[in-house]
Amino acid sequence: MLNEELTNLSKARLSHAEDCLREAKLLLEANEFKGAANRAYYAAFHSLRSVLILDEFDSKKHSGIIAKFRENYLKTELFSKEISDYISSLFRVRSASDYDDFYIISKDEAKSQVEKAEIILEQIKLFLDNRV
């Protein structure tokens, strides 16, 4: 792909991440905690994809996206270790919320997930502002 195509795809993915975060906040306000955790995770996930596409990397597997982001951006300390912890938490809670029939997520936990996604998205936006 051309640089312009990659940049446009990155921006589209970042916009998708922002939409997911907005949806997470709306679901949180509506006391839909599982949905809020789900959308918070996807806000972070799509923001990771917005960075990785600039390296011409994509994967259909969530684990592939997360592993490559950690390899390229966390091990190299372009982002803080805190981001890695947030990604792990978001993935764990989203998976439990989506696949564990008896998982109950509290309002505080859902709020925490939304806050973590917001921090990831803010840091990625700053990073991309300096890169694209």
Image (cartoon, rainbow, N blue to C red):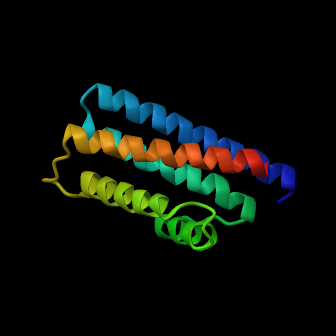
Using residue 65 as the reference point, say whether residue 50 is left or right of it: right
Residue 78: x and y in percent read 63, 63
Report if residue 101 is visible in the image: yes
Residue 99: x and y in percent read 25, 57
Residue 34: x and y in percent read 27, 43
Query: Is residue 79 shown above or below 13?
Result: below
Q: Residue at x 77, y 45 (%)?
A: 8
Q: Residue at x 38, y 27 (%)?
A: 26
**Residue 30, image quadrant:** top left
Using residue 4 as the reference point, say whether residue 16 is left or right of it: left
The residue lying toward the viewer, choosing from 61 and 37, is 37
Using residue 59 as the reference point, say whether residue 32 is left or right of it: left
Query: Is residue 3 shown above or below 57?
Result: above
Q: Quadrant of the N terminus?
A: bottom right
Furthest residue toward left: 102
- The total number of labels drawn is 0
Report if residue 34 is visible in the image: no
Q: Residue at x 23, y 40 (%)?
A: 108
Q: Residue at x 45, y 59 (%)?
A: 82
Query: Is residue 81 shown above or below 130?
Result: below
**Residue 25, image quadrant:** top left
Query: Is residue 80 shown above or below 110?
Result: below
Residue 94: x and y in percent read 33, 53
Using residue 58 as the reference point, say whether residue 67 is left or right of it: left
